[in-house]
Structure formats: structure tokens, C-alpha cells
Image: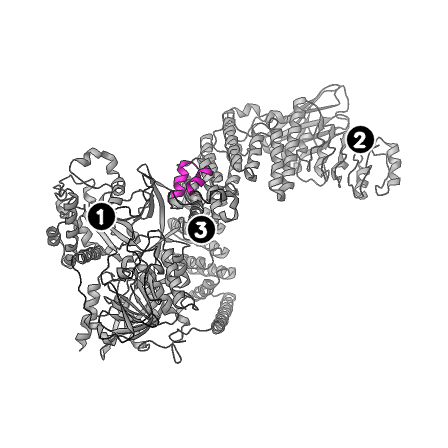
């Protein structure tokens, strides 16, 4: 048409582009071959730098070329003056910057950059920080840049305050940024550490509490400011998880001190069970058993062969060492690596004995906050409830309220907590299993607390929709356990930690596997009615357990019902496995 | 006299390549700055004598405002031959941006126009009218600007004297004699212009003539009037104050048509409001709400909840259907937003009035929110070097595709075919009859006889030069939008845009402040109260000390201009009695965005060319085929040697200030004669 500008057709353009690409590819391949030839010939000269530069600037992810470049640079470095070396590496930095523009997430580039900075006679860290800032302003979640920035900060000695301000700035511009929240959580304990707990030592049974235990906690004043910051974020956008995660970190408990939480000794079996505050590998931890002042050579084994790291370990005492009921014995377990130990006295006439910290003493399932701070927590709970009023469907808010309630008073808030779990499962059905497991965990914790307040060794938690079992190490001393009418799928290997268990009731569950059941020395009565136990093979080992009450039974196969009917007659296991759905 | 000059050519290469046979051929080599690609296009060729202007065009467009320029670009882009005229010696009409000195000349022109009535001679064109043809004369006077007042508060003293003696004239409106005495040669002409309006103002308002007040704070930083004049080229003062919604029709069009490559933009940094005399930040984005110190956490939640709802309010009709007939304000109340938040949403986010209905308010809020985050934390962009850039960008686009431009060239009358009642030709101010199939004209060229009604809405405007920002912050180079809610609910809200020097609209150390509202009285009546509330205006002696520290914290006004501009945006084709192929473009409206003008341009374009695409993307320079069967070249073809020459020239050229048309005229005037 008249007066129109003629433009190449798309087909023409495509064709041109294709040709262009072909040309480029040809050039790239020939240059690459040339470089690789040079490298195998061991040539380390300027030309190599030039060639690799050409290739890398179009494809910065070619790790071999970066390696070759480093070789060349190291070679050139030897023959140059200091000024020239500086210049050489500075131009290298410029080149890397250009490559980063091509691909800001190139592993090779970032790695090479940190390497160049270590070789640079006078590295300019301010410029590097500026580069990171620019890069993060383009993509605030570029983890390569975050990593590199950490190196730069470390090398250049930027103060923690400045770094905290840096996170302030990033969070201010967009608070949906895990990286900056997380960075904050590493900086705060350095800048505002929690003062050393002076009163804590008298509650702790271990005389040598290591000083670094509380090092990742933050002092209270700063904590209050951080709560406010997190509030602002989640009131602004309650569906953004990053602030909630940070908030949970703020509310979080310190890791438990590493210590021996319980020593149990049984005269009849001549066996010692030791529970630790967290899973350990006893063979390599330098455990030492001293009986009446005499170190004993014992072999530690975990409660279940599949558990290599376990919070509960067993050992057999030399035969006859404690079997005389009229003797009193003093037992000490030393954990030499952690400089801690626990004593246990086995008095005359006692068949067994133990020494432990109870869950109630340790406030094991509460927050580690001081009394003043629980008022703060109360305030936090209030503001979260306020948010819940505005956003009754918000899962993050619900979950946080549950956690706060647990931290404040797990037993007092039990009812509300369960109600909130119900809502959570409704508003977030995709994670209902997670909520069920979490709820089970809290219920078990509560039951442990109740049991210990009542000072009994009976653990009963029936008809509570339990889906999982946890804190089994806390149940080392339990003799009777009732888990009926729940939704348990298995008795996991950890179940073997219940070394004192005599009676187990677990009717009306969906238990398929009984792994944990085979290593219980005192088990006398098991009821597993209406479950889904599938494989007889497991049962074989169960029968072979030398300590179990079924020792006399030679063999039985659960697959065939007729065969275990005889078993039922012979033993008190009268209710076992009735109504199995096979 | 022909003028082809675009301010937008930041690296402009504009050269008269050859002059012979009475032709003056303009060639242009322009660089796409971003792509570093030189593109060579012959823009257009002119014949120097009036009768040599082509006598046939598809579309003749009169007026170079935004709407007309967009239409020109759109028509030219699809191959229409376009003649684009403007009676003024600058581009963009009421959309123009001026240097300080350019603005002073504009003020003078306004003043002269008030005095002189141009006599028109019919004789020239009478003879050109054939039988069966009728004539519709056009107006030669632009009456869209009124009530222009200028005051100067900057010191008149020489800078060196400042410290020793309090300037007697510090608050005096500009005086003709002193100005012309003190100014340097090149701006003398401009200076005189200021005097008359301000003197008349003195008489009318009995404003204090002199005030030997102490020089306000910071003597060393003080900016004198001389400084403003001397640095006048650094100013780009818009007649219309608008921002670009980053998802508005204008930005979309700029992107779609590739015209955006001709301009640069800056993000607005702050959205502020003024409540109880205090300027504070409006939390409008997520980050703002998060960082806000004024809001409680519950308010934050309520606000975010409301804003999230507004983003897709159409999906939740149940939330607002009871309020469709009720004002937006009531809906906000019902949503349990606190008083605070209601103000924020109503005035600063939706930017509507108390009376606006709910649905409109929701739509406005939604538009605002959708624009957030596209180019930064606020929804707005501002073109560097002023809003006047935008029409020129489109003019440039038009020229690149062959449009012909003549400034200081208007149309006297339209020649209408009696039988069809359609315009068949126009007679220009040089008496040439130019036939055309469509005629597009800006409203101010229309005579009252062709109008159904002569009652107009008006926009009140104030332009201030100040010494400080209304909201001091870490970075002083931020553009701020301030909405000032009305004191009484009946009064209009005032919108203020404060431009910093990095927006290339004012000299460093100053801020350019635009105030806009729909008029209820003269601009001064409407806006002076706001000015004195937000700024320190030196008045009578002795007043300043009593005001104390509070006054000092406010920025001081150095210079201020008030005027009213006619707002014709409500008019449509039924408001005029004109032939059907005459398309009237209304002037700028009072709103913050330019959507209205762009929509109008699009509808006019579709009227003219119903089957054509509106501003399709301009092709990449490298995709254009030049040789052999190349395009129908307008004028002399593409010449390699000439272009290289022009390129060299281009490198030497720096930014040409646009509003010095006198300079350009002289180039056009002298070159041919010297060749001869």
C-alpha cells in the first residue's frame, strides 16, 4: 500500500535468525576446540585468556574454561610485578561482571569471582558489596549472590550492625524474602545475645553446662522489637509465610542441653538403659559405666538394630554383678565427651531403680522463656487472636496461636488447641496429615506431663485420633500403655525404647507393621485387635525375641489363622490379632 | 517558514543537507539510544515557498497537543499522508513544557493576546472558493488560558550583596525595569513579559509591593531571581500537570507503538497527603503498609484486606451491591475502615470526591492498585524533561513515517462541499488551498459560532518554584504526588506534583511544584490557600518572625504563577456544528492520567480509518528494507554520504532546548538565503 514502510516478513526474519545461530554455533565450537587443544598442550598464555573470554562471555557456565583460566592466571601471576597482578585480576573482575550480566546465577562466575578476590593483592571489598547490592536489587533471592555476599562480608569485616541495617532495608522493600529474614536470625544473636543464664545452672543437673548453649538466643528487649517487626509483616500480609517462619524462630525454644536424662537399671536382667536428651551414637560417644567405683567393660547397643542413632542405649552388666537383691549398688554413667554424668543408686530389696529428670521439671514442652517473658508471650497470643478475628481462615495464624498456647500452658489450652487443629484441617486439607501428626505429638506431650504429675508409669491415650507416636524416649519407664482406638499405622522401631513395657493395648488402629514390638524384654500382654497387620515374616522375629514372653513358642505363622488359635490358648496373649484385616 | 524540530531528539541530528531549487530538505538520522543502532530515515522535505507545500493530504491536523499528535502518528504510521500544523511556535499546545525563559515569553504572548485583536483579511482566500463550496472560518485567537497571575518572591539582589543587606525587594512582584536591567542579553526578551501581569495583579489585589523582611533562613543557599533566569534552561515547566499511570492507556500506547524509545521516564517516589497541615506518606503498596509507622497493625490488616478486595472487586459483587447507589465514602465506612484509612483511600488512592459513587470509586482504586509494582513502588511515571515530551514523541513518530510538520502555520478556514457537507480542503494562513479528506482540529481553534454552548469547565493551576521538598527524606531526588483533601466537602481536592531536579524539570536546589484542581473561582482564589498552608510565602514585614519555627520548616516559594485552563474534555462531537469529517480534539482534562485523551485519539482514528490498526509497533530499524523495491520514499531518497555527514554533526549536537524556537527559525530563515 502507498507510503507504507516495507518490513521483512517473519519467515525472512526466522531464516536470518537461523543462519545467525548456525554461524554462532560454528564459531563457538571451533573456539572451544581450539581452547581445549591449547589446554592439553599445556599452554598458559594471554591468548588462552582471550579465547576463553570470548567463549565464557557467551556461555558463562562452562566450568572447564573457568578452570583453565585459573591455571593461566596462576601461571601469569608468577612472571609479573605486583601492580600488574593487581591490574590483571581487576580486569578479570570486570570480565566476570559482564558474564554475570549474561547469567546472574552462574555457579562458575560466582566461584571464580571469590577465587579472584583471594588472589587479588588489594581486594576492593566495597566495590564487591556494591556489586552484591546491585545484584540483589535485581533479584533479591539470588542465593548465589547471597552466598558470595557472605564471603565478602566475612572478608571485609563489615560490622554486624551494618548488616542488620542491610536486612532492615531489604525487608522494608519486600518482606517476602526468606534470605533476609534468615540472615537477620543469624545476626541478631551476635548483636544482642541473651545474657548468660545464671539461675539456669542450679536446675541443670550437669555441673558443667557448656557456655555456647544459649548463643543463638536473642536478648529480650531486642526480641520484643523483632516481634513487632514480624507483626507488621503478617498483619500486612498474613498469607506470606516468610514472616511467620521468622516469628516461629523468635518464639522457638533453645535446643535441649545435651545430657543423660535417665539411667535405669534392672536387677533381674542385669541391664542398664540410658536415655539421652537427643539421639546419639553411643559406641563412639565415650560412654563409661562405673559400678560401685569400678569401671565396667560393657557393650552398648541401641534398643533396636535399625536405630544407629538413638536416644536410648542398653548394656548388659557382667553376670552376677547386681543380681543379689540384698546388695546396694551405685551406678554412674559418664559421658566423657560432654563432661556430664548421671548417678543411679540401686537400693537393697529393689528389683529396679532409676534416676531421671522428669518432663515437668525440665518444662520440656514449654517455651524457654522467663516469667517476665511469658507475659510477653501472652501479649503475642492476644495480638495473634486479634488477627485471627480478622482472618479466621488463616492457617499461619492458627498454627502460630497453637504454638503460643503450647509455649504458655500446654495443658490449660488443650481444648482450644484441639479446636484450632480441627479448623486447620478444614482450611488447609492438603496438610491435614501434618496437622494430625503435630496434634498427636502435642497430645502425647500432654499425656506425658499428666502422667508425670500423677507420678505413675501408666500411659493411656486412647480414642484421640493419634496418627503417629513420638517422644517414646520419655516413656522408658512406662509399664502399661493404652493406645486403643487411634489411627496409628505402625509401631515404629523407636517403640523398642519402652524397655519397661509389660502391657500394650493397641486395639482398633490401622497398624500394619510391628517392628518396634520385637525387642521389648518385659512385654507380657499385647492386644492388637482390629488392626491391619500384614506380614507374618515380621512375626517370626517377634517370636524369636529371646526376652519376650513368647519365648516358648517355637513358631507360628500369622497368615494362617488356624495356627495361632493354639497360641492363644497357650498364652495370655488371648486377644492378639483378632479381627485382623489381612 | 518551516520548522522541523523536536525536543525529543536528545541526540538530535537535524541538518539541512542540501538547498537547491528552493527546496530545503531536512534529513534526519536518529539513534535509538538504547539499541545503539543508527537508523536513517528521510523525514520529510519542504519547499520553502508557501505555494510549494503539497496541495493534497489525506489528513490535515491542526494543533500539536497530545490527542492530535497521537492521531497524527497513528495515521502516518499506517501510510496516510499527514500535514500537521500548529499556529504557535512550539509543539504540544496546552500540553507544552517551557524553560523558565520560554514560559516568560509564553506569559507575554498571553498578555499581548489580551490586548491585540488580530484583524482578519478575507480577501486572500475568497478567490479560492469555488461554487458549491462553503466556508467555515476558524478562530485565530486561543482563549483557553485565563486569569494568569505571576508573583516572584525570590530575591532580586545580586548574590554577593545578599549577606550584607536585607533585600528590599525580596517579596516584591517582579518589576519590569529591574529585571531587564539585570538580566543577561539572551533572556532580555523573555524578562519583559513577566512584568505586566504581575503589575496588574498588584493593583487588583493591593498586594504588598515591597517587603524589606529579613532574608529567610540559610542565606548561603538562597536562590535569586537572576539565578532562576540564568539557569532558566534547566526548567521544563508543564502547562498541564499529569502523571502516567503505569498501566494506563498512555503507557500501553507508548509501549505498543514503540514510541517509548523516544523518551525516558522516572518513577514517582512518594505518594503523600496533607492532613491537618501535616504532610505524610500514604501507604499504598504492600511495602508501604508494612513500613508505615502511623498505622496500627489492625489498621494495616484492614487496609490490606480492603485493597486486596478492590483488586478483583468484580468477583465479589455481594460485597458492594448494596452500595452501588451510595457514595464510595459510605462504603468505606461500612468496611470498617478507620477515619484515617477512609481519607487515604478516598483522596489519595481512588482520588475521587466525597460524592463519587461506590462502583466508580472501586474502579479507580483498582486502577491505582493494578498500576503498582509495574515500574516501582508507586503506580506512576513521569517523563523526564516534562510532559511536553510526550506529544513531541508522537510527532516524531509521525514525521519518521512521512508526516510533514509546520509550526507557526495555521488554517484560516475550512472549505466545505455544500452537497455532501464535508470538508474538502482547508485554506492555510498563507492562503494556500490544501485539499484533504479528513480534518482534525484542537478545540481552541473552533469559533464560538460552531459551538452549541460556550460555558466551560475550568482547571485551576498553579506553578511554583520552591527551595525545598515538602517532605524531607533520605533522598532529595524524589518526585512526590501530594493529594490535599478539601477543607469543606464541597470544595475540590487539590492535587500537587512536586518535581525534583533529577526529573530534568528544574534547576538543582529547587523544586518545581504543580497544583491542579477543578475551578470554583480563579486559579488564585482556589489555590492560594493551599500554597500558603504548605509553603512559606514571604508576605508583609514582621510576619515571619512571629510565625516562628513552624514556618521555617516549610519550603519557601521563590516564584509562582496562577492560571486557569479551559477544560473541554466533557465535550463531544454533538457539542459542535461542524461537517462530519471534522474531528475536534478536546484539550487536556483535569484528571491525573491521560487516558481520556488517548481514548479520544483512538476513537477519532477509528472514525477516520475504521479498518486500520491503531499505532501498531514500529518496525525495528534493521527490519526495514531500503534498497531497490524499497518503500515509497517521501522526497529525496536515502543517501549514504549525507547520512554519515549528519551523524558526525549529530555527535557535536547536545541537547537542544526546545522552547527557543527563535533560534530554530533563524536557521531555517538564513540558510537558504546564504546558499543563494
| Image quarter (top left, top right, bottom left or bottom right) of the C terminus of chain B | bottom left
Range drawn in magenta: B326-346
On the image, the x and y values in percent for residue B30 come to 32, 68
Mark closest to the chain's N terminus, 1 or 3: 3
Report, in whole angstroms, how far the alpha carbon at label 3 lies from the one at label 2.
68 Å
Considering the numbered disc 2 on the image, is that residue within a helix, a strand or a loop? strand
- Is B427 rendered above or below residue B453? below
| Image quarter (top left, top right, bottom left or bottom right) of the N terminus of chain B | bottom left
Q: The disc numbered 3 marks a residue on which chain?
A: B
Residue B343 inside the magenta-drawn segment: yes
Question: Can you tell which mark lies on residue B370?
Answer: 3
Q: Determine which quarter of the picture holds residue A572.
A: top right
Q: Nearer the viewer, residue A459 or A79?
A: A459
Question: Is label 2 or label 1 in front?
Answer: 1
Report, in whole angstroms, how far the alpha carbon at label 2 lies from the one at label 1.
97 Å
Q: Residue at x 56, y 30 (%)?
A: A367
- Is B126 rendered above or below residue B179? below
Dominant secondary-structure state across the stretch colored magenta: helix
On the image, the x and y values in percent for residue B17 come to 26, 74
Label 1, on which residue? B560
Label 2, on which residue? A525
Amino acid at each position: 500500500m502507498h507510503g507504507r514502510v516495507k518490513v521483512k516478513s517473519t519467515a525472512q526474519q526466522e531464516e536470518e535468525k537461523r543462519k545467525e545461530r548456525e554461524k554462532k554455533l560454528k564459531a563457538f565450537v571451533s573456539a572451544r576446540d581450539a581452547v581445549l587443544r591449547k589446554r592439553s598442550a599445556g599452554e598458559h598464555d594471554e591468548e588462552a585468556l582471550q579465547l576463553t573470554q570470548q567463549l565464557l562471555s557467551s556461555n558463562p557456565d562452562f566450568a572447564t574454561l573457568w578452570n583453565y583460566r585459573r591455571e593461566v592466571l596462576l601461571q601469569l601471576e608468577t612472571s609479573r610485578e605486583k601492580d600488574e597482578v593487581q591490574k590483571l585480576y581487576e580486569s578479570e573482575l570486570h570480565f566476570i561482571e559482564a558474564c554475570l550480566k549474561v547469567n546472574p546465577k552462574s555457579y562458575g562466575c560466582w566461584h571464580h569471582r571469590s577465587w579472584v578476590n583471594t588472589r587479588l593483592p588489594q581486594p576492593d571489598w566495597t566495590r564487591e558489596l556494591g556489586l552484591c547490592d546491585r545484584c540483589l536489587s535485581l533479584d533479591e533471592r539470588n542465593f548465589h549472590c547471597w552466598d558470595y555476599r557472605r564471603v565478602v562480608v566475612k572478608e571485609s569485616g563489615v560490622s554486624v550492625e551494618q548488616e542488620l541495617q542491610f536486612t532492615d532495608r531489604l525487608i522494608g522493600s519486600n518482606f517476602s524474602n526468606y534470605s533476609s529474614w534468615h540472615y537477620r536470625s543469624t545476626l541478631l544473636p551476635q548483636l544482642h545475645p541473651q545474657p548468660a543464664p545464671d539461675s539456669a545452672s542450679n536446675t541443670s543437673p550437669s555441673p558443667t553446662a557448656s557456655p555456647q548453649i544459649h548463643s543463638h538466643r536473642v536478648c529480650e528487649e531486642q526480641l520484643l522489637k523483632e516481634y513487632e517487626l514480624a507483626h507488621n509483616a503478617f498483619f500486612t500480609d498474613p498469607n506470606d509465610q516468610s514472616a511467620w517462619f521468622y516469628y516461629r524462630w523468635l518464639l522457638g525454644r533453645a535446643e535441649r542441653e545435651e545430657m543423660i536424662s535417665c539411667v535405669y537399671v534392672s536387677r533381674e536382667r542385669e541391664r542398664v538403659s540410658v536415655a539421652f536428651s537427643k539421639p546419639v551414637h553411643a559406641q563412639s560417644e565415650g560412654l563409661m559405666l562405673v559400678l560401685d567405683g569400678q569401671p565396667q567393660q560393657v557393650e552398648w547397643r541401641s534398643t533396636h538394630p535399625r536405630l544407629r542413632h538413638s536416644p536410648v542405649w542398653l548394656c548388659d552388666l557382667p553376670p552376677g554383678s547386681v543380681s543379689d537383691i540384698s546388695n546396694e549398688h551405685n551406678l554412674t554413667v559418664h559421658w566423657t565427651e560432654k563432661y556430664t554424668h548421671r548417678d543411679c543408686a540401686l537400693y537393697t530389696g529393689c528389683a529396679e531403680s532409676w534416676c531421671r529428670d522428669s518432663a515437668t521439671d525440665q518444662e520440656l514442652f514449654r517455651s524457654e522463656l522467663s516469667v517476665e517473658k511469658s507475659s510477653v508471650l501472652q501479649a503475642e497470643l492476644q495480638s495473634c487472636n486479634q488477627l485471627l478475628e480478622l482472618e479466621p481462615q488463616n492457617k499461619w495464624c492458627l498454627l502460630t496461636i497453637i504454638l503460643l498456647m503450647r509455649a504458655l500452658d500446654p495443658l490449660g489450652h488443650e481444648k482450644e488447641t484441639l479446636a484450632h487443629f480441627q479448623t486447620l484441617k478444614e482450611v488447609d486439607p492438603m496438610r491435614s496429615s501434618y496437622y494430625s501428626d503435630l496434634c498427636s505429638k502435642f497430645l502425647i506431650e500432654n499425656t506425658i506431663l499428666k502422667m508425670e504429675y500423677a507420678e505413675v508409669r501408666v500411659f493411656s491415650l486412647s480414642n484421640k485420633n493419634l496418627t503417629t507416636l513420638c517422644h517414646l524416649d520419655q516413656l522408658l519407664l512406662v509399664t502399661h500403655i493404652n493406645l486403643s482406638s487411634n489411627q496409628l499405622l505402625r509401631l515404629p522401631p523407636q517403640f523398642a525404647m519402652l524397655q519397661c513395657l509389660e502391657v500394650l493395648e493397641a486395639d482398633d488402629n490401622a497398624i500394619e507393621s510391628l517392628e518396634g514390638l520385637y525387642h521389648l524384654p518385659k512385654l507380657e500382654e499385647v492386644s492388637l485387635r482390629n488392626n491391619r497387620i500384614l506380614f507374618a515374616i515380621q512375626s517370626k522375629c517377634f517370636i524369636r525375641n529371646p526376652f519376650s514372653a513368647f519365648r516358648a513358642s517355637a513358631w507360628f505363622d500369622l497368615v494362617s489363622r488356624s495356627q495361632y488359635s493354639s497360641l492363644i490358648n497357650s498364652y495370655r496373649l488371648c486377644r492378639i490379632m483378632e479381627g485382623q484385616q489381612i | 517558514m518551516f520548522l522541523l524540530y523536536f525536543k525529543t531528539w536528545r541526540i538530535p541530528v537535524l541538518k539541512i543537507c542540501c538547498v537547491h531549487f528552493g527546496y530545503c530538505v531536512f534529513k534526519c538520522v536518529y539513534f535509538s539510544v538504547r539499541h545503539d543502532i543508527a537508523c536513517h530515515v528521510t523525514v520529510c522535505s519542504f519547499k520553502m515557498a508557501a505555494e510549494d507545500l503539497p496541495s493534497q493530504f489525506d489528513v490535515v491536523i491542526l494543533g500539536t497537543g497530545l490527542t492530535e499528535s497521537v492521531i497524527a502518528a497513528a495515521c502516518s504510521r499506517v501510510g496516510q499522508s499527514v500535514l500537521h500544523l500548529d499556529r504557535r511556535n512550539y509543539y504540544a499546545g496546552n500540553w507544552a513544557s517551557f524553560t523558565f525563559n520560554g514560559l516568560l515569553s509564553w506569559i507575554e504572548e498571553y498578555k499581548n493576546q489580551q490586548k491585540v485583536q488580530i484583524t482578519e483579511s478575507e480577501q486572500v482566500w475568497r478567490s479560492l472558493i469555488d461554487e458549491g463550496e462553503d466556508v467555515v472560518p476558524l478562530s485565530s485567537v486561543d482563549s483557553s488560558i485565563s486569569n494568569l497571575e505571576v508573583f516572584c518572591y525570590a530575591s532580586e539582589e545580586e548574590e554577593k550583596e545578599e549577606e550584607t543587606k536585607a533585600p528590599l525587594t525580596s517579596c516584591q512582584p517582579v518589576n519590569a525595569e529591574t529585571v531587564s536591567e539585570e538580566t543577561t542579553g539572551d533572556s532580555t526578551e523573555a524578562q519583559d513579559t513577566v512584568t505586566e501581569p504581575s503589575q496588574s495583579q498588584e493593583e487588583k489585589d493591593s498586594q504588598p509591593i515591597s517587603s524589606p523582611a529579613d532574608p529567610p533562613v540559610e542565606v548561603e543557599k538562597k536562590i535569586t531571581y537572576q539565578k532562576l533566569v540564568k539557569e532558566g534552561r534547566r526548567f521544563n515547566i508543564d502547562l498541564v500537570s499529569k502523571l502516567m499511570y503505569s498501566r494506563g492507556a498512555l503507557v500501553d500506547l507508548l509501549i505498543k507503538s514503540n514510541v517509548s524509545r523516544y523518551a525516558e521516564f522516572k518513577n514517582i517516589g512518594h505518594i503523600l497527603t496533607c492532613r491537618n497541615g501535616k504532610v505524610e506518606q500514604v501507604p499504598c503498596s504492600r511495602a508501604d503498609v508494612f513500613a508505615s509507622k502511623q498505622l496500627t497493625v489492625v489498621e494495616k490488616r484492614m487496609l490490606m484486606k480492603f485493597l486486596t478486595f478492590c483488586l478483583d472487586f468484580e468477583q465479589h459483587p455481594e460485597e458492594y451491591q448494596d452500595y452501588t447507589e451510595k457514595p464510595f465514602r459510605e462504603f468505606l465506612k461500612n468496611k470498617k475502615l478507620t477515619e484515617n484509612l477512609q481519607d487515604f483511600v478516598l483522596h489519595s488512592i481512588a482520588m475521587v470526591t466525597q460524592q463519587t459513587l461506590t462502583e466508580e470509586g472501586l474502579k479507580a482504586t483498582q486502577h491505582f492498585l493494578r498500576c503498582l509494582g509495574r515500574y516501582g513502588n508507586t503506580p506512576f511515571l513521569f517523563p523526564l524533561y516534562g510532559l511536553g515530551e510526550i506529544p513531541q514523541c508522537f510527532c516524531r513518530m509521525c514525521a519518521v513515517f512521512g508526516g510533514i510538520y509546520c509550526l507557526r502555520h495555521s488554517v484560516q478556514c475550512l472549505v466545505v462541499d455544500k452537497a455532501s457537507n464535508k470538508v474538502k480542503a482547508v485554506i492555510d494562513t498563507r492562503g494556500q488551498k490544501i485539499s484533504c479528506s479528513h480534518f482534525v482540529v484542537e478545540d481552541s481553534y473552533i469559533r464560538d459560532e460552531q459551538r452549541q454552548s460556550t460555558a466551560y469547565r475550568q482547571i485551576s493551576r498553579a506553578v511554583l518554584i520552591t527551595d525545598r521538598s515538602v517532605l524531607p527524606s533520605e533522598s532529595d531526588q524524589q518526585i512526590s504526588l501530594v493529594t490535599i483533601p478539601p477543607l469543606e466537602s464541597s470544595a475540590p481536592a487539590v492535587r500537587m506534583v512536586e518535581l525534583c531536579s533529577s526529573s530534568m524539570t528544574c534547576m538543582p536546589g529547587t523544586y518545581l511544584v504543580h497544583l491542579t484542581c477543578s475551578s470554583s473561582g480563579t486559579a488564585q482564589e482556589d489555590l492560594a490557600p493551599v500554597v500558603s498552608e504548605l509553603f512559606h510565602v514571604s508576605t508583609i514585614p514582621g510576619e515571619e518572625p512571629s510565625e516562628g519555627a513552624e514556618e521555617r520548616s516549610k519550603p519557601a516559594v521563590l516564584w509562582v504563577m496562577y492560571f486557569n485552563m479551559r477544560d473541554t474534555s466533557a465535550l463531544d462531537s454533538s457539542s459542535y456544528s461542524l461537517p462530519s469529517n471534522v474531528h475536534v480534539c478536546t484539550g487536556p482534562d483535569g484528571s491525573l492520567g491521560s487516558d481520556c485523551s488517548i481514548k479520544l485519539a483512538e476513537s477519532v482514528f477509528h472514525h477516520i480509518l475504521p479498518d486500520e490498526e491503531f499505532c501498531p509497533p514500529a518496525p525495528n530499524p534493521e527490519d526495514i528494507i531500503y534498497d531497490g523495491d524499497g518503500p515509497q520514499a517521501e522526497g529525496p531518497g536515502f543517501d549514504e554520504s549525507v547520512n554519515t555527514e549528519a551523524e558526525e554533526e549529530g555527535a557535536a549536537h547536545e541537547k537542544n532546548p526546545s522552547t527557543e524556537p527563535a533560534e530554530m527559525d533563524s536557521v531555517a530563515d538564513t540558510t537558504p538565503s546564504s546558499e543563494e
